[in-house]
Image (tube, helix red, strand yellow):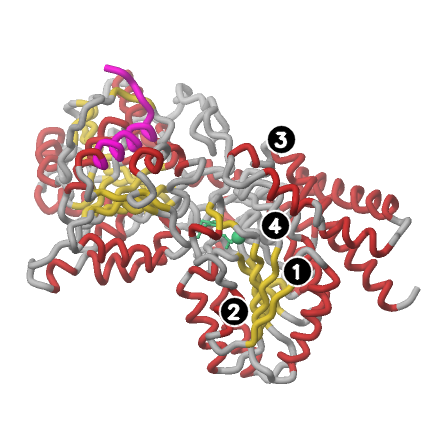
């Protein structure tokens, strides 16, 4: 199968969805601009016209409400924001309207809107350009929250989200856009609400999501060499959360490490630890969580390295859970400066 | 030297210094030491200089993601700004904010933030407190043509009008919000200052590339505000020369035409002012600014990053 980037996979999903249904439209500041939201919307306006693919005023709140209104008549809007943080202006529309519309009117109406949000990371994005807010969205009943970790899931989950009848928050980590993987040319769906076992193992269950799955995969390989067999589960959607699949795995391994890309407290990883603890009483070591310190994301290059855990920290955390030494772990040479995902990233955004 | 010529020279100096600072950042950005989103003000210097020079030192300013010029024109420390962009602990926000989060309270520069429109109500809040304290200064907020598309702008202006607050709203219309032109965001032929007038606020319009015009207009408006005429709004036309975010030119992208760019470049605010003052001091000035700027970069480069402990302690 051919390989394409995550950004390209998103782009393909959009082409595919818009071809499949005339109801699908997409808009947001910069959607038709020459950069095409990190190349994810490139070519859409040329192909589908400016009625269905359009730029917007810098008006996140109103545009979300407008998307909600359009969706009531069966239009399927896909809204895009270059950062999650900008979408915070639309909290009223998404929380008080989109998530509630169905229940407010006794299920007689639904809001099939998809909101694509990009999560910033590194290169000095700082406190208001790199927030990881999936737990906030996941906390709201009535919203679905999707966070793919690879190109295959990105395409399949975006298509599923667009044709789902409920409002969906679709989170793309900026560092995944350049990630390459196998993706079918044809249209396919990945179900929302199903976690995926990336690697089977017997000693510990590791759950992760979005970009953290990439770091986890490196860690799991290293741990294998050190004699620890990890079962790695990519959550893929934080709401609904496939807690059954996780519990099934922990029942087998009797150990849990929940990895998250957000700050620790009140996080999705907390939710996983809580749910597992309530189901399984006898674990071989206390359930654990690896996430960010409860601090706003830093700007300075001197702070980001310590703030963001990666494969090395994951490996260390697991070793500690097994009571093993964590010294002499020198297999994690960082090829790039720590605040960029690779050579393809040239800053500044 | 007479007073008005002296003022013209000061305006020229302020703009030239800002331009040279911004160009030094553009030139050194590829060294990879300034690792944060950086929005340059090259081409837009006359607004920052004209407005801030007409304000008093005690007046308070808030700004946006594109804040370097406002900060410098208001008297913010150059060294602290450059160090901030380098992410160093000697920066104005201790390296924890970066290019988009500048502050220098001693100069009356109360902060800049990275979310479009979100300092506008904060500036109204400053004005509310100024009024409550019966102070004689004013609040002033800079924002772009994109920010008037946010609901919070209307809500904030409305309240300022209701309470007759001492605030100056400065809209820098550079025709773009990132790569999206006004034509896809606002109705054709509708003038921002005319629309805003309907909110019940006095509005004004000026050439944002003519520093003398910006200066004298702001002086007049400031007088009105301190004499209790209520909040005032001014729209100033200008143009950003470089890319929206980052150090390069971007005409190759095709979102704006070379002709448009050249027509604005011909209206270079600094060149216009240079012709007016007919100064022969240009080279001396440029040389001394170049020296000051080089020192600021060296200072930033040599400074330390903030420690994680510091970062943590500020937040706990
Ligand atoms: C609420 C919000 N939406 C979008 C962005 C992304 N963004 C950063 S700067 C900018 C341009 C805003 O245009 P304008 O207000 O005209 O300022 P200019 O960049 O032209 O100076 C945008 C859209 C943001 N920072 N915040
Ligand atoms: Mg603008």
> What residue appears at the point 18 percent right and 46 percent down from the top-left corner?
A239
Instruction: Tell me which label, 4 or 1, sits earlier in the chain.
Output: 1
On the rendered structure, is A261 left or right of A233?
right
Q: Earlier in the sequence, mark 2 or mark 4?
A: 2
Q: Which mark is residue B239?
A: 4
Q: Is residue A192 above or below residue B71?
A: above
Do tags 4 and 1 sit on the same chain? yes
Label of residue B253 in the image: none
Q: Disc 4 to disc 1, how far (Cα)? A: 11 Å
The CA distance from mark 1 to mark 2 is 15 Å
Q: Quadrant of residue A58?
A: bottom left
Mark sitting earlier along the chain (3/1) = 3
The x, y position of residue A339, in whole percent, is: 47, 34
Of residues A80 and A19, the one nearer the viewer is A19
Residue B18, percent from left and from top: 71, 50
**Disc number lying in front (4 or 3):** 4
Reading the image, the residue beneath label 3 is: B31
Helix, strand or loop for disc 2 = helix
Q: Residues within 10 Å of mark 3 (few under 14, many from 20)?
A: few
Magenta part of the protein: which range? A1-18
The tag on residue B207 is: 1
User: Is residue B44 within the magenta segment?
Assistant: no
Badge 4 and badge 3 in a common chain: yes
Quadrant, the C terminus of chain B:
bottom left
- Is residue B56 among the parts visible in the rendering? yes
Label 4 SS: loop
State which tag comes first along the sequence, 4 or 3.
3
Compared to residue A57, the image places residue A46 above or below, namely above
- Check the residue under mark 3 and report the chain it is in: B
> Could you classify mark 4 by the number of other residues whose Cα lies within 10 Å: few (under 14), some (14-19), or many (20 or more)?
many
The numbered dot on residue B194 is 2
């Amino acid at each position: 199968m051919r390989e394409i980037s995550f950004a390209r996979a998103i782009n393909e999903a959009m082409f595919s969805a818009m071809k499949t249904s005339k109801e699908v439209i997409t808009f947001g500041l910069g959607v038709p601009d020459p950069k095409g939201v990190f190349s994810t919307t490139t070519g859409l306006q040329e192909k589908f016209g400016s009625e269905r693919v359009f730029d917007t005023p810098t008006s996140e709140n109103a545009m979300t409400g407008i998307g909600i209104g359009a969706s009531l008549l069966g239009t399927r809007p896909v809204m895009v924001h270059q950062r999650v943080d900008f979408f915070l202006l639309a909290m009223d529309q998404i929380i008080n309207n989109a998530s509630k519309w169905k229940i407010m009117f006794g299920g007689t109406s639904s809001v099939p809107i998809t909101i694509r949000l990009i999560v910033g990371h590194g290169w000095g994005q700082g406190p208001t350009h790199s927030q990881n807010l999936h737990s906030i969205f996941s906390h709201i009943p009535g919203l679905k929250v999707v966070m793919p970790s690879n190109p295959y899931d990105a395409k399949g989950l975006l298509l599923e989200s667009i044709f789902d009848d409920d409002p969906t928050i679709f989170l793309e980590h900026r560092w995944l856009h350049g990630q390459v993987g196998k993706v079918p040319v044809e249209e396919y769906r990945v179900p929302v609400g199903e976690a995926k076992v990336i690697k089977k193992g017997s000693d510990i269950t590791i759950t992760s999501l979005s970009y953290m799955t990439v770091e986890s995969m490196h860690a799991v390989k290293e741990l294998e060499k050190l004699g620890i067999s990890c079962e790695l589960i990519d959550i893929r959607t934080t709401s609904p959360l496939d807690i059954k699949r996780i519990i099934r795995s922990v029942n087998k391994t009797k150990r849990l490490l929940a990895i998250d890309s957000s700050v620790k407290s009140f996080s999705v990883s907390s939710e996983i630890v809580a749910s597992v603890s309530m189901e399984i009483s006898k674990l071989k070591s206390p359930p654990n969580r690896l996430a960010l310190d409860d601090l706003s994301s830093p700007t300075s290059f001197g702070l980001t390295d310590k703030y963001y855990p990666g494969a090395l920290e994951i490996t260390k955390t697991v070793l500690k859970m097994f009571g093993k030494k964590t010294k002499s772990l020198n297999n994690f040479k960082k090829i790039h400066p720590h605040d960029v995902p690779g050579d393809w990233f040239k800053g500044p955004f | 030297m007479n007073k008005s010529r002296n003022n013209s020279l000061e305006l020229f100096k302020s703009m030239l210094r800002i331009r040279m600072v911004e160009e030094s950042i553009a030139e050194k950005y590829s060294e990879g030491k300034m690792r944060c989103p950086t929005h340059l003000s090259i081409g837009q210097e006359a607004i920052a200089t004209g407005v801030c020079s007409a304000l008093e030192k005690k007046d308070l300013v808030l700004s946006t993601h594109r804040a370097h010029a406002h900060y410098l024109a208001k008297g913010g420390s150059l060294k602290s700004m450059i160090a901030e962009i380098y992410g160093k602990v000697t920066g104005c926000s201790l390296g924890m904010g970066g290019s988009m989060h500048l502050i220098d309270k001693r100069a009356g520069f109360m902060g800049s933030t990275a979310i479009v429109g979100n300092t506008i109500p904060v500036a109204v809040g400053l004005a509310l407190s100024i009024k409550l304290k019966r102070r004689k200064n004013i609040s002033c907020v800079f924002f772009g043509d994109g920010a008037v598309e946010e609901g919070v702008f209307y809500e904030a202006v409305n309240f300022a009008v209701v309470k007759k607050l001492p605030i100056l709203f400065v809209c820098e219309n550079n025709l773009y919000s990132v790569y999206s032109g006004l034509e896809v965001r606002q109705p054709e032929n509708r003038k921002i200052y005319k629309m805003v007038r309907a909110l019940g606020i006095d509005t004004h319009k000026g050439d944002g590339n003519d520093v003398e015009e910006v200066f004298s207009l702001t002086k007049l408006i400031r007088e009105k505000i301190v004499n209790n005429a209520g909040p005032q709004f001014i729209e100033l036309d200008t143009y950003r020369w470089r890319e929206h975010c980052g150090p390069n030119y971007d005409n190759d992208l095709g979102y704006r035409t070379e002709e448009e760019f050249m027509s604005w470049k011909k209206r270079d605010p600094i060149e216009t002012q240079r012709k007016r003052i007919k100064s022969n001091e240009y080279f001396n000035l440029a040389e001394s600014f170049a020296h000051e700027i080089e020192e600021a970069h060296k200072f930033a480069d040599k400074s330390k990053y903030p420690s994680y402990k510091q970062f943590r302690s500020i937040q706990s």
